[in-house]
Amino acid sequence: MFGLLGCSVNTQKNMKTKIELLSPEGLHKNPAYSQVAIVEGNYRTVYIGGQNAVDKDGNIIGKGDLEAQAKQVLKNLETALQAAGASFENIIKWNIYSLQGQSPEKALKVFQEPMSKMKQAPLITGVYVSSLAHPDFLMELEAIAIVPIP
């Protein structure tokens, strides 16, 4: 059977889920992130679009303050994860977009708390960009989570 993208799909319901995050020999090992994710078995993949520092009413939180924006971004990410039946420990990949000229240390300090709940550090890609969707946004975060199906 083929899925929407032409990928092979296993339809056996009794197959177990295996999620493995690796930092193989020959690649830099850093405790803050993994290099490779391997997912096999019964699982649900959750893709979370770019989260910005906007509250539920559409107000931008922390104008000019990267640390305050990072806290709101994580709050939004947690809300999105919960809506999908997932949590921070299910995240296997983060893409972090920072406005050029911002120092990522403040945001990374905020990210340490939820990352401490993860069994293994996720894959992380960090990119500096010249602008985001609104001139007051200093960062954006998107994520991929894998949730085992019981």
Image (cartoon, grey):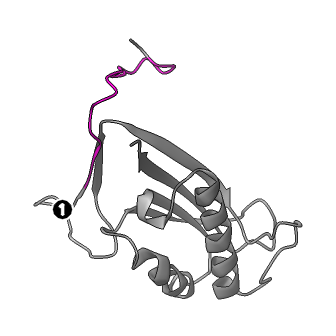
Q: Nearer the viewer, residue 74 or 150?
A: 150
Q: In the rendered image of this protein, does residue 31 appear above or below residue 34? A: below
Disc 1 element: loop
- Give the image location of residue 85, x and y in percent: 55, 53
Number of disc labels: 1
- The residue lying furthest to the top in this view is 1
Nearer-the-camera pick, 19 or 60: 19
Residue most toward the left? 25
Q: Which residue is mark 1?
A: 27
Residue shown at 81% from the left, 70% from the top: 55
Q: Nearer the viewer, residue 27 or 49?
A: 49
Horizontal arrangement in the rendering, residue 38 relative to residue 48 (left or right): left
Looking at the picture, does residue 17 appear above or below residue 3?
below
Q: Identify which amino acid the numbered label 1 is placed on.
A: Leu
Asked if one can make out residue 123 in the rendered structure from this viewpoint, the answer is yes
Q: Main secondary structure of the magenta part?
A: loop
CA neighbours of label 1 inside 10 A, class few (<14), some (14 to 19), many (20+): few
Q: Quadrant of the N terminus?
A: top left
Q: Position of residue 150 (x, y in %)?
A: 38, 43
Q: Where's residue 94, x and y in %?
A: 48, 61
- The location of residue 40, given as percent across then percent down, is 28, 38
Q: Is residue 99 visible?
A: no
**Left or right: 87, with 101 as reference point:** left
Viewed as shown, does residue 45 lie left or right of 25? right
Asked whether residue 8 is drawn in magenta, I would say yes
Quick check: is 16 in the magenta stretch? yes
Q: Which residue is painted at 12% across and 60% down in the image?
A: 26
Q: Quadrant of residue 149?
A: top left
Question: Viewer-proximal residue, 52 or 44?
Answer: 44
Residue at 28% from the left image edge and 53% from the top image edge: 36
Q: Which residues, given as a range, are shown in magenta? A: 3-20
